[in-house]
Image (cartoon, grey):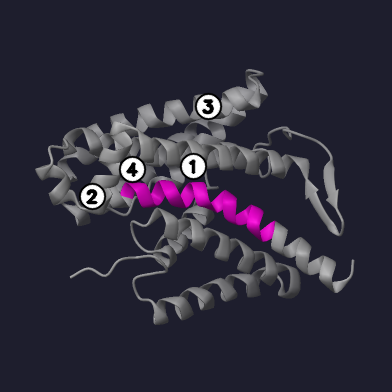
Amino acid sequence: MNLTGTLLQALSNGIILGLLYLLMAVGFTLVFGVMRIVNFAHSEFYMLGAFAAWLFVSHWSVPFPIAVGATFVLAVIGGWIVEWLVLKPFRHDELNGMIATIGLAMVLQSLALIAFGPDPQFMPSVADGSLELGPITLPISRLVVVGFSLAVLIVLYGFLGWTRWGRALRAVVQDMEVATVQGIRAKLVYPLGFGIGVGLAAIAGALMAPLFSVSPFIGETPLLKAFIVVILGGLGSIPGAALASILIGVAESLGSTYFGGNVSDIAIFVLVMLILTVRPTGLLGKQTA
């Protein structure tokens, strides 16, 4: 492959990777925007979503699209219950709420270890073959995952923009005090926002399960990348998270292609530091008083 072909391949892989990070990051941003806590259990919902998809497809022979949908529904319900049982006392206590999510992450990971063991599990590919576009080769399995990701993001955009509950979530993310004055019931928005946020993490895990192995420890790296994306995009900014996801995915792909994985990680952190030096609030973050 010539230099141009290698560059185009790296860019396409980076865009795909960025879209995969985006679901995780949007869920993380949504939880932070609604509850103002950093949800360290986000990675474990990603892991549980991967295990749920693995069980549905590999053990119960459920078609992959139905498995992804069922995983999301179960995660939203589970997230609603977890917020009500565990995080409700910390709705106005951001520091202790964050500590509570660390404990929740440890509990969920331990339960996964007991239930599934430490060994990696593998899920069948959702599609075989690859698509050739000139010098670019795109595995069909990754295109299917990207298609699902885009579909989920379009549905989420429609929900946030055109439904009553979606507008309530957006209002809370933008300004909790004003939203409360307007009659929005925060006690219902909190569990809904947390449920949808962790549901998006579970979908990300379900979509990545056919591409990678599944184990109780797979959520750590995606959580780190999601955290970087959220900081780079601007805390609470969903459009910022989208832009940052693509930048991180492309930077990681280009770094891995030309310099190796270790240099790729360094390049990502250098990129983040440079951008935050110019824009401390992130790409699309808002300055707070």
**Residue 205 occupies quadrant:** top right
Q: Disc 3 or disc 2, which is closer to the eye? A: 3
- Residue 113 visible in image: no
Residue sitting at x 56%, y 65%? 247
Q: Earlier in the sequence, mark 3 or mark 4?
A: 3
Q: Residue furthest left?
A: 181
Find disc 2 in the rendering and name its residue.
97
Q: Distance from label 1 to label 4 (Cα)?
A: 13 Å
Q: Position of residue 44 (x, y in %)?
A: 44, 43
Q: Earlier in the sequence, mark 1 or mark 4?
A: 1
In magenta, the rendered stretch is 13-31
Find disc 4 in the rendering and name its residue.
104
Magenta-drawn stretch, dominant element (helix, strand or loop): helix
Residue sitting at x 53%, y 47%? 217
Category of crowding for the residue at label 1, using alpha-carbon neighbours closer than 10 angstroms: few (below 14), some (14–19), many (at least 20): many
Q: Disc 1 or disc 3, which is closer to the eye? A: 3
Q: Earlier in the sequence, mark 2 or mark 1?
A: 1
Category of crowding for the residue at label 4, using alpha-carbon neighbours closer than 10 angstroms: few (below 14), some (14–19), many (at least 20): many
Q: Quadrant of the C terminus?
A: bottom left
The three-letter code of the residue at mark 2 reads: Gly
Q: Position of residue 40 (x, y in %)?
A: 37, 51
Category of crowding for the residue at label 2, using alpha-carbon neighbours closer than 10 angstroms: few (below 14), some (14–19), many (at least 20): many
Category of crowding for the residue at label 3, using alpha-carbon neighbours closer than 10 angstroms: few (below 14), some (14–19), many (at least 20): some
Residue sitting at x 68%, y 36%? 122
Find disc 3 in the rendering and name its residue.
69
Given residues 11 and 114, the one toward you in this image is 11
Find disc 1 in the rendering and name its residue.
46
The three-letter code of the residue at mark 1 reads: Tyr
Disc marking residue 216: none
Residue sitting at x 35%, y 35%? 195
